[in-house]
Image (spheres, grey):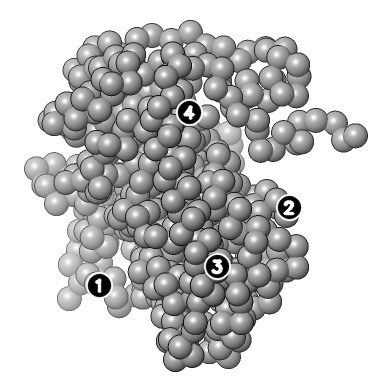
Amino acid sequence: MSPRMKAGEAVIELLRQEGVTHIFGIVGSSFLDILDPLYDRDDIQFIGVRHEQGAALMADGFSRISGKPGVILVTNGPGVLNLTFGVGSAFVAHSPMVILAPSASRDHQYRDSTQEFDQVALFAPITKASFPVNKIERLPDAIRHAFRVATSGKMGPVLVDIPRDLLPGAELDIDLLPPDTYRTGQTRSRGDRDLIDKGARVMLAAQRPVIVAGGGVVWSNAGNEVTRMADLLGAPIVTSYGRADAVPNDHPHFLGHLGRLGSEEGAEAIRQADAILAVGTRLGQSTTFFDNRFIPAGVPIVQIEIDPRELGRNYPISVGIEGDAKAVMMELLELVQQAEPRPNPAWVSEISDWYARRNQRLQDEGNLSSMPMKPQRVYAELRKVIPRDAIIALDAGLAPNFGQDRLMYYEPRSLMTSLDLGGLGFSFPAAIGASFAAPDRPVINFNGDGGFLFNAQEFETSVRYKQKLVTVVMNNGCWGSEKAYQRYAFNERYVGADTVNPRFDKYAELFGGAGFYVERPEDIGNAMLEALKLDGPSIIEIPIDPDEMPRPARLSDVQAPK
């Protein structure tokens, strides 16, 4: 017989069945029936934050590191509206997420009542699904469906709109079903065998093959399959933008990432490719810029994508294989191994040269001596001390983006960026979420001065939960990316480009954390080591050169055509 329970208790029980351990949000009158059953229990923790945007970004970070759905619960109207950036971030990253979004009471809807918005319509473009619950008996099915959609295929966020009058006083009978009775989770679709065979023939015929590894490799844990293929074919590995953790960075065929501030050596290698194996990547704009600066025109491309809409969408392909990156790569590896490939010795030698050149380039940046410090020098010092298992969160600003090519990632799910969304303020809350997902791993967040202040209030959240989270604020006193456009496209006519900041180390101390202020490169490593030893969060502020502004990769977008 199905147990009968209060509606709020039923919601918590459904989440417990799904293995949910953390719910991110701010207490609100519209869902107290759900919060009350959490009193005096420790299997599910409600993480109270300081702004709903922070809750959504924490849930995104939690999801990216744990691989499990992040769950959000906030009040209707402005609370739900504040989630949009964080939910959009999860949508771009394909992070599974479930948003429980209370809405106006049914009797008050469509009357412009207090805090009433069409939340279902508002979130439709940035979720995999967005739907309302119209009667309390449908709530269990709605929540189960949300997890089913969020975790299937190319994953993403799902919003469940719950009118606030449904919960108070309501009871319902609920079947306690384990998740595997109503969803399969992340299935590993293997792809069409004939297409895999055709793809194997394309790659085996290549003399200068290159592998591009994307987010699908990260989500499906296919890094081992990618490196094995690189060894078999004698192919270099480059990653898509923001996905440098797709494979261990000390693999001798890894040449860095493509896109903004990407690896010169990786770009040079792919320009010479006579075949490209694109694994779990749509070859999007932030990686390729939709032109031929990296991807050679006419080169055969074998593309593996779990979403069939992305196959051949941005570049013509020779073979398009719909399927999970790991599952397809396992099949592809079997065929390639059977053929006993013989890598091109000249190409393998070039790969070794590029690998050595990249390492030497990064090492040489440790000799930069100008003051204030160049961000390249900061990363050179930090590479010496950052633990191999560290989780790195990089914000969208100029200084953090240098870290994609200058920090090393050795384990899967070690790097978080805002990817194609390019949103400032992403990384700090995402790092907080990552710390909840992996409390035993060091988490290090990199912000510019501008981006940090987008969500700086969440430092209190990190202090309250005693997180071992280190934030590096690289302070150049300006909006670096935008100022670079004004330098190169508008003859240094700077408008709104400069900022005035507090001392961020003192900010940390005011909230009960630790603060470090570092002006000399020889002090950076010690500051990081000290911060990593602490039992709470810290901020390391490092003034950097405000004139270090590389020419923007998309400069032509703001210039009139000639």
Question: Of helix, strand and loop, which one carries label 1?
Answer: loop
The image quadrant of residue 340 is bottom left
Residue 107 appears anywhere in the view: no
The Cα–Cα distance between marks 2 and 3, rounded to whole angstroms, is 25 Å
The Cα–Cα distance between marks 4 and 2, rounded to whole angstroms, is 25 Å
Point out which mark residue 347 bears. 3
Crowding near pointer 2: few (<14 within 10 Å), some, many (20+)? few
Q: Amino acid at mark 4?
A: Ala
Task: Read off the residue under disc 1.
Answer: 177
From this view, report whether residue 83 is shown above or below residue 368.
below
Task: Read off the residue under disc 2.
Answer: 291
Q: Earlier in the sequence, mark 1 or mark 3?
A: 1
Question: Of helix, strand and loop, which one carries label 2?
Answer: loop
Residue pushed farthest left? 40
Q: Earlier in the sequence, mark 1 or mark 4?
A: 1
Where is residue 162? Give x, y as percent: 42, 49
From this view, report whether residue 422 is shown above or below residue 381.
below
From this view, report whether residue 90 is shown above or below residue 277.
above
The Cα–Cα distance between marks 1 and 4, rounded to whole angstroms, is 48 Å
Question: Which quadrant is home to the C terminus?
Answer: top right
The image quadrant of residue 29 is top left
Badge nearest the viewer, 1 or 2: 2
Where is residue 235? Give x, y as percent: 50, 68
Question: Of helix, strand and loop, which one carries label 4?
Answer: helix
Badge nearest the viewer, 1 or 3: 3
Residue 493 appears anywhere in the view: yes
Point out which mark residue 399 bears. 4
Q: Is the C-beta separation of discs 1 and 3 under 8 Å?
A: no
